Amino acid sequence: MKPSLIEALQNITTGIYILTTGKGHETHGMIVSWVSQISFDPPLIMVAIRKNRPTHAMITRNKNFALSILKKEQKDLVGQFKLADTRNRFKGLKCVVAKTGVHIIGEALAYIDCELYQTIDVDDHTLFIGRMVDGDVLNKGYPLSVQEYGKIYLGYA
């Protein structure tokens, strides 16, 4: 990708979220930033996931996902959810089970719980469109963005 395009992309305001999926004891979480609300009625939200991620197969199988919206002060959680050992990603966190059975991060600013509504293949990523079935503000604060975090995901990893 052209360096000037990378610089331009770094100026798009994008949040950083923990996406979780699963049911029961099968829970997985990863960091995502390519997220957008796409419809009001029905209430739909879209997230892009690279096809080589374990989360991709789990969302397809479980038909659910949730977004835990991080606070500015929670930059350290980004690193925790990049750990190679996926069992330690939730270590020390208070998790709450949402309506769809997905675990959400209780310390997060807010969450959005989704049932899988549709998928769209876009080459190396899939757009997972979720129908928002629940959500709430859990704590006071301001959302974490890529500007505060200082890094931007460009789709390579």
Image (cartoon, rainbow, N blue to C red):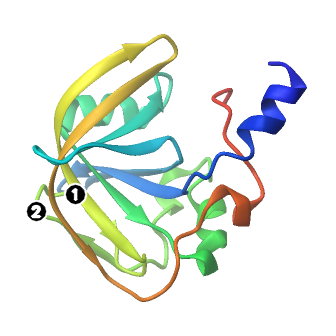
Q: Three-letter amino acid code at disc 1?
A: Asp
Q: Does label 2 or label 1 sit earlier along the sequence? A: 2
Q: Position of residue 51 (x, y in %)?
A: 46, 22
Residue under label 2: 99
Q: Residue furthest top?
A: 123
Q: Is residue 1 above or below residue 112?
A: above
Left or right: where 49 falls relative to 45: right
Q: Residue at x 71, y 45 (%)?
A: 152
Q: Residue at x 48, y 79 (%)?
A: 92
- Whether pointer 2 and pointer 1 mark residues with C-beta atoms closer than 8 Å, the reply is yes
Q: Is residue 55 above or below residue 1?
A: below
Residue under label 1: 113
Q: Quadrant of residue 76?
A: bottom right
Q: Secondary structure at mark 1?
A: strand
| Total numbered circles | 2
Q: Residue furthest right?
A: 3
Left or right: where 21 falls relative to 91: left
